[in-house]
């Protein structure tokens, strides 16, 4: 049965069919994107979307069937509906599930495209054969051409959906979604007509050109549809190239691109600056030739082989520069993979020379005294522990320098530090090479004497070394030493006790006279009379509230105005006169009196603040030193809270200073207590900051308000300017205030101000003052206080 062509192809119906297929393609793109982005209930949603798409395809084919004006069999109509809808649903679901994964290989791409083409052809030919069973007669040449065109359309459709549903690229190419859907819908709209043309014989009057028109239309639609992915594909290639070049050229680190043999193919400008070679000199060079020594070269070769096998590791090595100098570098190597094949490696190289120097300095400062450059107590204990683990015998010499505290209190810390530096140099000279001289703290030093050396001979050399005066500030001083010696393991096998025994022997030598040494013996355990006497006297002094509080003002270095004061305990002994804090504070700590002492100071300060408050004075914040032991008292926060209520004081008047050692304890309970104090209005300051325990990771987690730069840095501010600047910068970044203590000269003030430290404390402005003298100075600083006095 021959059908005139014009009854097969109706322009209006074709236009309506194309519109519906454009909409269905847009829906298919969005459905695929949504399932990709949100895989929750993926299977259920894919089924729902597939049924909806199948319904649209069925609707478009009903338009074609009705408009074709070809007799169709009503007997097979329901079978047609069911079969066509089922095939389209199954095909749409299968294609959607395949398209939800990133199809990267050619076989996957071909498989998905052929699945879609086969589904379309099977649905079209089966459906039309059922509905037009009386009129169909396959035109095999046209059927083959139809099959070819449907296959081409399927490949173009899969390529378009893969690219347009890539979320990494979607924002860049989404404007092509609508244009691509229009051309894709046009191509899909032509499929039922070319299939129908290949199945229904047309009259001879229709002519060759007439029945070929749908195929020409399909060819044109496919051509336009093909251009869309090509258009944004070119842009994507350009974008990827630009992104690659940007990452390569503008990387702040040096980047080397090398081939599988390790030959350098390309470098960025940072690599040129790092190595000192030109880009052309580096190109073609084996990367191993930039490594400083042979052992390192072998290590890098092994590392490179591991990288090529898939491991991504970081390695540190030494890089050789063009000027024969070297740089410490950290290398991160990643493979360059194209189509699942490794073609080379990117080596990202960071210059860590300065970081290494800083780490080395930090490690050095952790185990050395920054004033004398001698090993510190931590290093001494580490060496003692190592000798103990080896079962070796040794002796420990403990030294205390007489009259030093008097000199230090009289002339100030800066002057005292000069004395300590000379002491350190002298000890280093007389200590045998295989022994260890260290500074324990203050004016106390120790010498570890190893096997093969006689401790009495070393002690005798120390005594002789300090029989001549030392010079400081144009003056000469005779500094004599009291020396105690304890032997390991003869006296004790406990390292901590060994230090104590050497200390006892030193006190015995001090009692016998200056410039003498004394070996420890067991009788000294019961003869430590002086310290025991002071301990009892201190206990009674705390009980009778007979210690006093001095106040050392804090100043703004720019305005020279008082910003607060530090409360300092002072003890005037009935027989010995003023006992330095450096003497009675350690005794209080050893005798477990420190908590009672600090609470006595707190009450005295609060009482004095109440007096000033009653006189209507404007009183700046007062800081009180609190030991870490106090934080282990369960009632500390409660005590502070109740004391504020008892004295009717605001927490804003109080600041507590805690030592930097609090940062290595890492107990959450301490931080909770600090936060509780701050919630009362009390500020928290880290005292002696930078003396060995500094850790940014701890500091950032602690509830503190202020860092107090230790006086040892201030005393040598020129040499330590970088450290001070780092502390100020760190405090600024953490929104913390900063104050420097131990300021004694105008040059120190100028340097601190230039480094950003505005708040200072020290003898340059004022020594610690009795409360009456501090009150007078405070009243001069605050005009409103003067007004109170006059009225």
Image: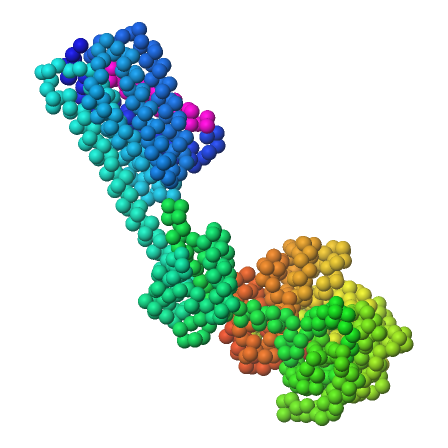
**Scheme of image coloration:** rainbow
Q: Is residue 427 above or below residue 194?
A: below
Is-magenta flag for residue 80?
no
Single out the residue that lies furthest toward the top.
75
Residue depicted at 72% across the width and 63% down the height: 628
Residue depicted at 74% across the width and 61% down the height: 630
100 left or right of 471? left
Q: Quadrant of residue 745?
A: bottom right
Q: Is residue 647 above or below residue 722?
A: above
From which residue to which does the magenta span run? Answer: 43-65
Query: Residue 480 at what x, y percent from top left?
Result: 75, 88
2 left or right of 90? left
Residue depicted at 47% across the width and 56% down the height: 305
Query: Residue 691 at what x, y percent from top left?
Result: 64, 71
> How many labels sit on residues?
0
Residue depicted at 35% across the width and 28% down the height: 115
Magenta part mainly helix, strand or loop?
A: helix
Q: Quadrant of residue 98?
A: top left
Nearer to me, 116 or 298 = 298
Q: Is residue 269 visible?
A: no
Query: Residue 84 at what x, y percent from top left?
Result: 33, 17
Nearer to me, 696 or 332 = 332
Nearer to me, 299 or 552 = 299
Q: Is residue 205 visible?
A: yes
Is-magenta flag for residue 56?
yes
The quadrant of the image that shows the C terminus is bottom right
The quadrant of the image that shows the N terminus is top left
Q: Is residue 239 above or below residue 502?
A: above
Query: Residue 459 at what x, y percent from top left?
Result: 77, 85
């Amino acid at each position: 049965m021959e059908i005139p062509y014009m009854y097969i192809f109706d322009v209006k119906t074709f236009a309506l069919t194309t519109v519906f297929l454009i909409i269905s393609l847009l829906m298919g793109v969005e459905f695929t994107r949504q399932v990709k982005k949100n895989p929750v209930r993926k299977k259920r949603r894919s089924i729902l979307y597939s049924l909806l798409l199948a319904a649209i395809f069925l609707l478009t084919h009903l338009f074609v069937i009705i408009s074709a004006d070809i007799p169709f069999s009503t007997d097979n109509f329901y079978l047609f509906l069911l079969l066509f809808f089922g095939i389209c649903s199954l095909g749409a679901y299968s294609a959607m599930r395949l398209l939800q994964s990133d199809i990267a290989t050619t076989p996957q791409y071909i498989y998905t495209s052929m699945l879609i083409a086969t589904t379309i052809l099977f649905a079209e030919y089966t459906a039309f054969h059922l509905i037009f069973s009386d009129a169909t007669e396959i035109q095999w040449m046209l059927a083959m051409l139809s099959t070819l065109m449907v296959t081409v359309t399927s490949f173009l459709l899969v390529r378009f959906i893969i690219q347009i549903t890539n979320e990494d690229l979607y924002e860049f190419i989404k404007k092509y979604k609508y244009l691509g859907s229009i051309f894709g819908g046009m191509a899909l709209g032509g499929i039922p007509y070319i299939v129908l043309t290949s199945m229904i014989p047309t009259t001879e009057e229709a002519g060759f050109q007439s029945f070929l028109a749908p195929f020409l239309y399909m060819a044109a639609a496919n051509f336009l549809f093909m251009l869309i992915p090509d258009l944004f594909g070119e842009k994507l290639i350009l974008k990827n190239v630009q992104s690659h070049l940007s990452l390569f050229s503008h990387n702040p680190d040096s980047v080397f691109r090398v081939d599988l043999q390790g030959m350098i193919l390309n470098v960025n400008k940072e690599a040129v600056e790092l190595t000192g070679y030109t880009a052309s000199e580096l190109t073609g060079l084996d990367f191993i030739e930039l490594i400083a020594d042979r052992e390192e070269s072998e290590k890098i070769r092994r590392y490179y082989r591991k990288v090529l096998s898939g491991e991504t590791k970081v390695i540190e090595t030494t890089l050789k520069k063009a000027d024969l100098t070297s740089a410490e570098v950290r290398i991160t190597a990643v493979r360059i993979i194209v189509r699942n094949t490794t073609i080379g490696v990117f080596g990202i190289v960071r210059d860590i020379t300065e970081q290494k120097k800083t780490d080395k300095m930090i490690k050095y400062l952790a185990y050395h005294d920054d004033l004398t450059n001698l090993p510190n107590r931590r290093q001494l204990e580490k060496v003692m522990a190592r000798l103990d683990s080896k079962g070796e015998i040794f002796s420990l010499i403990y030294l205390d320098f007489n009259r030093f505290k008097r000199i230090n209190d009289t002339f100030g810390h800066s002057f005292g530090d000069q004395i300590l530096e000379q002491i350190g140099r002298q000890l280093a000279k007389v200590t045998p090479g295989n022994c260890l001289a260290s500074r324990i703290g203050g004016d106390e030093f120790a010498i570890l004497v190893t096997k093969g050396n006689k401790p009495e001979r070393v002690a005798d050399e120390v005594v002789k070394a300090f029989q001549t005066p030392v010079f400081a500030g144009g003056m000469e001083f005779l500094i004599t030493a009291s020396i105690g010696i304890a032997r390991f393991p003869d006296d004790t096998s406990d390292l901590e006790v060994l230090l104590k025994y050497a200390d006892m022997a030193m006190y015995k030598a001090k009692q016998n006279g200056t410039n003498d040494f004394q070996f420890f013996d067991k009788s000294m355990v019961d003869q430590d009379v002086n310290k025991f006497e002071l301990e009892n006297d201190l206990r009674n002094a705390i009980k009778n509230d007979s210690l006093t509080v001095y106040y050392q003002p804090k100043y703004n270095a720019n305005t020279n105005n008082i910003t607060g004061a530090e409360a300092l305990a002072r003890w005037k002994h009935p027989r010995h006169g003023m006992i330095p804090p450096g003497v009675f504070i350690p005794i209080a700590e050893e005798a477990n009196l420190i908590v009672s002492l600090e609470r006595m100071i707190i009450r005295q300060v609060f009482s004095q603040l109440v007096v000033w408050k009653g006189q209507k004075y404007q009183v700046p914040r007062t800081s009180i030193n609190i030991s870490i032991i106090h934080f282990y008292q369960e009632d500390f926060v409660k005590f502070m809270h109740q004391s504020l209520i008892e004295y009717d004081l605001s927490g804003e008047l109080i600041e507590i200073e805690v030592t930097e050692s609090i940062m290595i304890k890492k107990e959450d309970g301490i931080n909770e207590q600090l936060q509780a104090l701050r919630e009362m209005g009390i500020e928290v300051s880290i005292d002696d900051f930078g003396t060995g325990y500094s850790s940014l990771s701890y500091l950032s987690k602690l509830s503190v308000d202020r860092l107090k730069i230790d006086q040892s840095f201030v005393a040598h501010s020129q040499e330590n300017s970088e450290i001070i600047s780092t502390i100020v910068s760190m405090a600024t970044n953490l929104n913390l205030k900063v104050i420097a203590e131990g300021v004694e000269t105008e040059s120190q003030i100028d340097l601190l101000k230039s480094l950003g430290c505005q708040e200072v404390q020290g003898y340059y402005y004022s020594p610690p003052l009795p409360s009456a003298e501090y009150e007078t100075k405070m009243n001069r600083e605050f005009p409103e206080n003067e007004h109170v006095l006059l009225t």
